[in-house]
Image: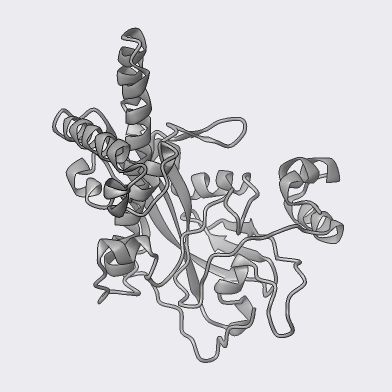
Amino acid sequence: MTIDWNAFNPVKPLQPGIHEFQSYDLAEIAKYIDWQFFFIAWELHGKFPAILSDEVVGKEATHLYNDAQAMLKKIIEEKWLTARAVIGFFPANSNGADTVTVTAPDGAQVPLEFLRQQIKKAPGQPNMCLSDFIAPAESGKQDWIGAFAVTAGEGIEKWLDKFKKEHDDYSSIMLKALADRLAEAFTELLHERVRKEFWGYAANEHLTNDQLIAEEFLGIRPAPGYPACPEHTEKYKLFDLLSATASTGITLTESLAMYPAASVSGWYMANPEGKYFGLGKIDHDQLQDYATRKGWDLETAEKWLRPSLD
């Protein structure tokens, strides 16, 4: 992908560095919940709020929604869960290819390794890589990248244990679904604050919740393990840059899942041309190149990239 870096000047964050949020107001977070995904977790499909009056699933959806609202009220008023987060903004430049070098708070140079699409496309359609959205060093322009780690799952185990003892599977599933929605809502809320306050590259943004859900904002927040960057081990670098575990209590399991489960982490990219995409399948040449960049043998690279291999 070709961005005219001569015509574009990256925006320096208004508040660079690292910012922690402890015990964030759950009532404020709840305003950002995307209820459509709540219903998907219960295998009910349809647009919210229309799903509540749907001829087929409307009655069941309304019952679920009312129960969810009642539990959410308790979660907020009785502080069942604690929401914590850390965000950070770091100088970064790409190498003009698939690596982005980030300057850590201690001055260390941290290479972030991304993967490039290798799909046959129509003439003039580029094969994209997330590194394309960060200014190359040869442009002479200092760019930035952000990172975040968010959880709304702290405290959940006490309640899950209670529901287990009471053989109340319904409440257990409901709480997990609401914790997941709160974590995603917290991610949405913070990204809005990043765009308007902390990075400030869209300081005059005024979007409704529906527009936020439709992602009508500038910039993206891709997450390791997601379609554009499916390789999970880059999470180690993200967590190290933010000191995420110390700040939020989120830990990484052996398989690179986050614990508590109701947690989200990823990168912030501010370029207005930034967009989400699926990597698709990659060829052996890129597997070999990625292994070299990561300092891995081929077997290790195959283990972590297996779902993406052609």
User: Quick one: 168 or 306, which is closer to the camera?
Assistant: 168
Is the N terminus in the top left, top right, bottom left or bottom right quadrant?
Answer: bottom right
**Image position of 234 with respect to 8: above or below:** above
Extreme-top residue of the structure: 165
Q: Is residue 156 left or right of residue 287?
A: left
Extreme-front residue of the structure: 55
**Image position of 193 with respect to 168: above or below:** below
x then y, percent, for residue 100:
61, 65
Instruction: Look at 57% across and 43% down and name the residue there.
Output: 236
**Total residue callouts:** 0
Instruction: Look at 61% across and 49% down and name the residue there.
Output: 234
Q: Look at the image and name its color scheme.
A: one colour
Residue 19 showing in the rendered view: yes
Is the C terminus in the top left, top right, bottom left or bottom right quadrant?
Answer: bottom right
Instruction: Look at 33% across and 63% down and name the residue there.
Output: 212
x then y, percent, for residue 309:
78, 51
User: Quick one: 268 or 102, which is closer to the camera?
Assistant: 268
x then y, percent, for residue 141:
52, 81
User: Quick one: 203 or 210, which is closer to the camera?
Assistant: 210
x then y, percent, for residue 22:
26, 41
Instruction: Look at 44% across and 45% down and name the residue there.
Output: 264
Residue 15 showing in the rendered view: no
Extreme-left residue of the structure: 77
Q: Is residue 42 left or right of residue 212?
A: right
User: Quick one: 32 or 132, which is closer to the camera?
Assistant: 32
